[in-house]
Image (cartoon, rainbow, N blue to C red):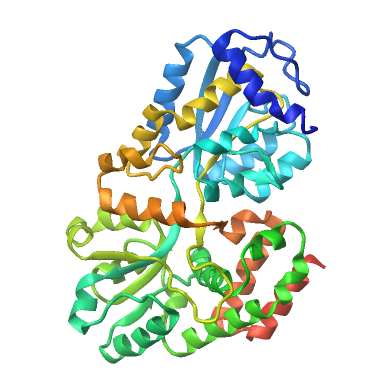
Amino acid sequence: MNRGSRRWFLTAAAAATGGLSVAGCGSFASDVSNGIGSTDFWTLQDPTNSVQQTAVDAFNSAGHGKISMSVIAANKYKEKLRRAMGSSKMPGLFFSWGGGDLAYYDKAGQLKGLDNFLEIYFLSSALEAGKVGDKLIGLPCRGAQPVFLFYNKKVFADADVEPPKTYANLTDLVTIFKGKGVTPIALAGSSSFLWTELMWVEYLVERLARPWFFQDIQGGQWWLWSDPAVLKAAQMIRDLVDSGAFGKNFSSINYGAGGTSTMLSKGEAAMVLMGSWEYAVQQGQDPDFTKNDLGYVPFPTVEGGKGDPNNIVGNPTNYISVTMSAPEETAAAFLKTTYSDSYVEGLIKKGEVPVTTNAEKMLAKSPDPAYARFQYDLVQNATTFTQSWDQALDLRLGTPILAEVQKLFSGQSTPKQFVRGVLNLKK
């Protein structure tokens, strides 16, 4: 699709709302007239489905076509979507995590480009995982899910210490908490939760390397894994492990209730590095702890690092994309709901922190306004919001990287072997 035809969204949206005609763009379903018709929207089963369904119901009553929403269980979603794409069962719109999978579908010519004019409605750092190059192919539809440090306020108060602002602070705290018989940092290192180890590597590389470092790797410069910042990050990981920062048995610990979340709430661990969803896990297992003693701070700065200390990692958000089977005016009009006040307010009341520019004025309606404000500021102040590597890269690379990270944490590979192992993944 050339640059001119990528502007289909603005033209289609105008047609949907102002009765204008619209030129065709690409190939569409044969029964679509003037870009208005019926189409499927596939989405993942999660707590925001009720917000999405409300938007669909309101849209269907407005007369710009019809959207049929299908909710699909998480363990079946990706495989079902892969089978459907390119077939007669391809949905017109679908939910995704952005990154490698979207790039794959775009390369296959199955996605419409969305007009970059839409960027004015969203926080810029959250849009990157919905792009291929400068081409926007995914529009945010949920809240941000940044990763940061959670800590137990009571454990810190008992030790008479403050949460870390620098990496040197963090390593000092490891010594202090070990001396008090507390695991400094809870880590779910069992084989089902290797992404929790990946978070540490991602953040250290983000702090040490120059800005946009991983984005360049994702764009094809795989040789950048040989950058000294990657080796330094791997050495820092080994130092943390060897110092006992994660305790002695982290490789057998799971994530969530009964695992790292319980360790934190019970005071068995002082800190945990986790995505924003940790709050909901804690709220579910121990509301009193969540209200009184759950603290949170950004990942520390790293002395001498070239990275922007305001930048964050995690899941920037989730996205809706439009396939070549979608009636263009119907799709364009429905995408407008993703940044409408009613949709954004619905997400906020569910505890989400939307990445829209109009969300800030509604954060007071969140179940915990202070927590919502903290997350919103993290995203707003970040120049880049690096998507989790295993999501940003396709499965041929994302899954093997997790295996290399596990070997580094378990001591099966040295920092130099880790770098060599990741470099060799693309040979």
**Residue 91 appears at what percent x and percent y?**
63, 27
Horizontal arrangement in the rendering, residue 360 relative to residue 369 (left or right): right
Q: Quadrant of the N terminus?
A: top right
Q: Is residue 424 above or below residue 416?
A: above
Residue 146, visible in the rendered structure: yes
Which residue is found at the position 78% from the left and 24% from the top?
Answer: 26
Residue 65, visible in the rendered structure: no
Front-most of residues 141 and 362: 362
**Residue 278 appears at what percent x and percent y?**
36, 58
Q: Is residue 297 above or below residue 362?
A: below
Q: Is residue 162 above or below residue 25?
A: below
Horizontal arrangement in the rendering, residue 200 relative to residue 107 (left or right): left
Front-most of residues 399 and 158: 158
Q: Is residue 120 above or below residue 327?
A: below
**The image quarter in which residue 274 lies:** bottom left
Front-most of residues 139 and 256: 139
- Give the number of marks: 0
Horizontal arrangement in the rendering, residue 213 relative to residue 356 (left or right): right
**Residue 73 appears at what percent x and percent y?**
49, 39
**Residue 43 appears at what percent x and percent y?**
52, 34
Which residue is found at the position 61% from the left and 84% from the top?
Answer: 412
Front-most of residues 289 and 383: 383
Q: Quadrant of the C terminus?
A: bottom right
**The image quarter in which residue 415 lies:** bottom right
Horizontal arrangement in the rendering, residue 292 relative to residue 84 (left or right): left
**The image quarter in which residue 25 lies:** top right
Which residue is found at the position 54% from the left and 51% from the top?
Answer: 125
